[in-house]
């Protein structure tokens, strides 16, 4: 196997040091919110967002006022995007059915899909107001039937961002807050004097938001670890350098630490893409951000074969994987670790980010090895149940249960089975003995 890096990003040791600094900061902030509640949230809002409102929760009139500021064309676009996302989420929900089966005569087993009862949706808005994140979290939770959906986004230029507020309200949020970053995530999960805590946190964010979710996991559920954006372009000679460079920089502009990787079996394409990225960075308005990400986290990897490309792609497990080759369906069939696939040159990651209908909250930092992205099923808990309706079934299962419990030394467990065998099977089982 021959894999060559024509460009590497920061070494893992430097990335780990950055992560350690983030962990320490987040731990301090969450502890402050736990101790001081609303006062801590307000201090953090002033410090990070220069925002000190009478209340962080928007009233109905404030929501209406914000929505009135959204241009008609923008409202039309938001409605279109939400229609696409709702259609796909509803189809996904329909695929999840409650079941009940009779596994033995008189024994019924089943499961029910029950919505999480309260969810906090974080919508990023610091460097870029992520209007689409409201669709992806709030609307999807609404389709799942979550009875309490609260949403929070940071202020933009000292005020609620009108389009974000509109997307939250139209998506089905019951409470809307103007809070950013760690303080928003912490307040929704921990709770304060004025904010009732939620059962689950969802939504993407920067490294600090992702780390806050990691530290809060267990106290609340989370969708996944959705940190800084990652993108990978898998390409061969069927596409050109301009397309590859555009797709790499289109995601690198998210932040200063957004990994962007080109994976190819064409040295010609790899070298041309490096030159094309340099050219585009001269004209891209967000080059100040994208250029740093590309310098520190960009990589170009040259492989000898498609099999090697597949192996490297599965190992990296990138959040977004754009596949533009002569065998896109082969990658679809054989890739197993990623956030979402974007197949062929006619689609792109931005489609998935904003409008096409699939969810854009996806696993990062190799989490695609063990989880998929946010979807309607994340808001549903599958709970099993059992019912035994005949004396014969109670005695039969009880006898097996009694012996298996005693095999493990659990006498109290065995007695739970034995008492049923005695009552419904009319057998005299000595106390603390296995049923015969």
Image: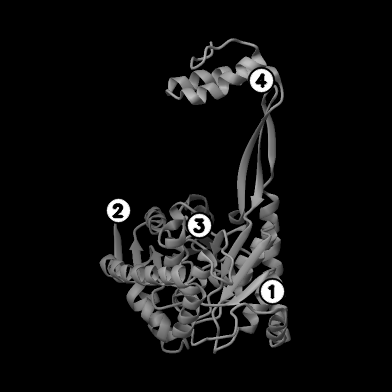
Query: Pointer 3: what residue?
Result: 327
First in residue order: circle 1 vs circle 2: 2
| Left or right: 25 as drawn, with respect to 153 | left
Q: Position of residue 399 (x, y in %)?
A: 57, 17
| Left or right: 55 as drawn, with respect to 143 | left
Q: CA distance from mark 2 to mark 3?
A: 20 Å
First in residue order: circle 1 vs circle 3: 1
| Residue closest to the eye, 185 or 337 | 185
| Residue closest to the eye, 186 or 94 | 186
Query: Pointer 2: what residue?
Result: 1
Question: Dot 3 lies on which element?
Answer: loop
First in residue order: circle 3 vs circle 4: 3
Q: Residues within 10 Å of mark 4 (few under 14, many from 20)?
A: some
First in residue order: circle 2 vs circle 3: 2
Q: Position of residue 56 (x, y in %)?
A: 59, 79
Query: Pointer 1: what residue?
Result: 169
Residue at the image point whose x is 65% and y is 21% from the top: 394
| Left or right: 60 as drawn, with respect to 177 | right
In the picture, the disc for residue 393 is 4
Q: CA distance from mark 1 to mark 2?
A: 52 Å
Q: Residues within 10 Å of mark 3 (few under 14, many from 20)?
A: few
Mark 3 or mark 4, which is nearer to you? 4
| Left or right: 139 as drawn, with respect to 125 | right
Q: CA distance from mark 4 to mark 2?
A: 59 Å
Dividing the picture into quadrants, the one containing residue 264 is: bottom left
Q: Is residue 114 above or below residue 84?
A: above
Mark 1 or mark 4, which is nearer to you? 4
Question: Dot 2 lies on which element?
Answer: loop
First in residue order: circle 1 vs circle 4: 1
């Amino acid at each position: 196997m021959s894999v060559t890096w024509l460009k590497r990003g920061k070494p893992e040791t430097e990335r780990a040091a950055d992560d350690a600094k983030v962990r320490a900061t987040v731990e301090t902030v969450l502890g402050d919110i736990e101790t001081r509640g609303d006062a801590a949230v307000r201090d953090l809002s002033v410090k990070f967002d220069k925002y000190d409102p009478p209340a962080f929760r928007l009233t109905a009139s404030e929501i209406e006022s914000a929505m009135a500021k959204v241009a008609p064309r923008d409202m039309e676009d938001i409605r279109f995007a939400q229609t696409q996302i709702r259609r796909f989420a509803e189809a996904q929900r329909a695929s999840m059915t409650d079941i009940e089966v009779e596994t033995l005569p008189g024994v019924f087993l089943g499961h029910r899909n029950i919505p999480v009862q309260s969810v906090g949706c974080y919508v990023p808005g610091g460097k870029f107001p992520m209007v689409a994140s409201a669709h992806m979290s709030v609307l999807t939770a609404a389709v799942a039937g979550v009875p309490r959906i609260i949403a929070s986004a940071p202020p933009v230029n000292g005020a609620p961002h009108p389009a974000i507020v509109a997307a939250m309200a139209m998506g089905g949020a019951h409470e809307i807050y103007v809070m950013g970053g760690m303080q928003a995530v912490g307040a929704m999960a921990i709770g304060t004097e004025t904010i009732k805590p939620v059962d689950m946190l969802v939504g993407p964010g920067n490294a600090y938001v992702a780390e806050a979710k990691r530290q809060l996991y267990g106290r609340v559920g989370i969708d996944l670890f959705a940190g800084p954006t990652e993108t990978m372009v898998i390409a061969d000679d069927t596409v050109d350098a301009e397309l590859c460079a555009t797709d790499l920089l289109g995601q690198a502009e998210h932040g200063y630490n957004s990994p962007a990787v080109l994976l190819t079996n064409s040295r010609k394409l790899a070298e041309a893409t490096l030159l094309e990225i340099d050219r585009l960075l001269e004209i891209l308005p967000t080059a100040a951000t994208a250029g740093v990400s590309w310098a520190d986290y960009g990589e170009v990897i040259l492989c000898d074969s498609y099999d090697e490309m597949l192996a490297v792609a599965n190992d990296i497990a990138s959040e977004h994987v754009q596949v533009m080759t002569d065998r896109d369906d082969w990658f679809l069939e054989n890739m197993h670790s990623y956030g979402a696939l974007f197949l062929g040159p006619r689609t792109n990651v931005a489609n998935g980010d904003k409008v096409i209908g699939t969810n854009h909250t996806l696993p990062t930092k190799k989490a695609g090895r063990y989880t998929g992205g946010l979807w309607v099923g994340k808001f549903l808990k599958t709970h099993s149940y059992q019912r035994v309706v005949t004396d014969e079934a109670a005695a039969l299962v009880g006898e097996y249960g009694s012996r298996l419990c005693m095999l493990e030394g659990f006498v109290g467990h065995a007695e739970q089975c034995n008492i049923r065998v005695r009552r419904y099977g009319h057998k005299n089982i000595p106390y603390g003995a296995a049923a015969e």
